[in-house]
Image (cartoon, grey):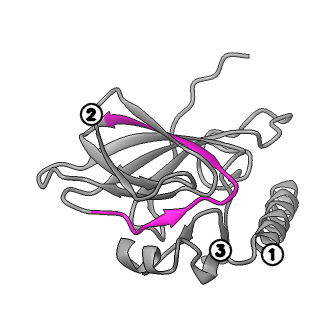
Amino acid sequence: MARVITPGKLFDMPDGTRVAPVFNPFEPLSGATAPEPDADGRMSVALGELRAGRSSRIHVLPFVRQITWVLSGPVTMIVKGAADAAPQRLTLLAGQALETAPGDFMQLVNPDRQRPCRMLHACTPGYVFHTENGTLRYEDAVVFAEDWDALAAQNWHPPALADLDTLQKARDRAIERITAQARTV
């Protein structure tokens, strides 16, 4: 079935970016276009924005592979994957994309001090972000207060990523709560 999909409203994320869900089975109450009833959570798409001259905080998506496609830019992505000795700094122009694997450290930087940059984020499995009564209960991104030097000094093993089993269980519980909440609406 063909459908026109409209992004929801942009809202501020803990990493400093702004996101508007476009399609996400795990965000049925976000204002995004509702997915097909048989959507299984294998992917999500969101419009992302980074304000002029701003940087996101460094973050990791432990369980999510993400494609960041630049719609208007440029945007600089600083990324450190498991096999990388040091972070890479890559500047993407409109029409270019970068894939980050689960567990990659990343930071978005908007070098343009006049205009926001806009991106499309496609994630697999679908990105999970759960709030309840205005309080954040779970988010797939683990966001760090530390800078790149501090994370390197921790040998890329910050305490927030020490127990991936516990993080996975928290993700599973969030999906259960979201699914139950969606059934009551």
Q: The N terminus lies in which quarter of the figure?
A: top right
Q: Which residue is drawn at 12% across and 55% down?
A: 113
Locate residue 84 relative to residue 135 in the image: left or right. left
Q: Distance between the residues labelled 1 and 2?
A: 37 Å
Foreground: disc 3 or disc 2: 3
Q: Which amino acid does label 2 sit on?
A: Leu
Q: Is residue 118 magenta?
A: no
The reply to whether residue 141 is in sight is yes
Q: Give the range drawn in magenta.
A: 55-71
Locate residue 179 relative to residue 150 in the image: left or right. right
Q: Position of residue 40 (x, y in %)?
A: 83, 39
Q: Which mark is residue 151?
A: none
The kind of secondary structure element at disc 2 is: loop
Q: Which amino acid does label 3 sit on?
A: Leu
What residue does disc 2 label? 93
Relative to the observer, which residue lies in front, 91 or 127?
91
Q: Which amino acid does label 1 sit on?
A: Thr
Relative to the observer, which residue lies in front, 112 or 146?
146
Badge 1: few (under 14), some or many (20 or more) residues near its Cα, within 10 Å?
A: few
Q: Position of residue 163 (x, y in %)?
A: 75, 76
On screen, residue 4 above or below 151: above
Badge 3: few (under 14), some or many (20 or more) residues near its Cα, within 10 Å?
A: some
Q: Residue at x 61, y 55 (%)?
A: 30
What residue does disc 3 label? 161
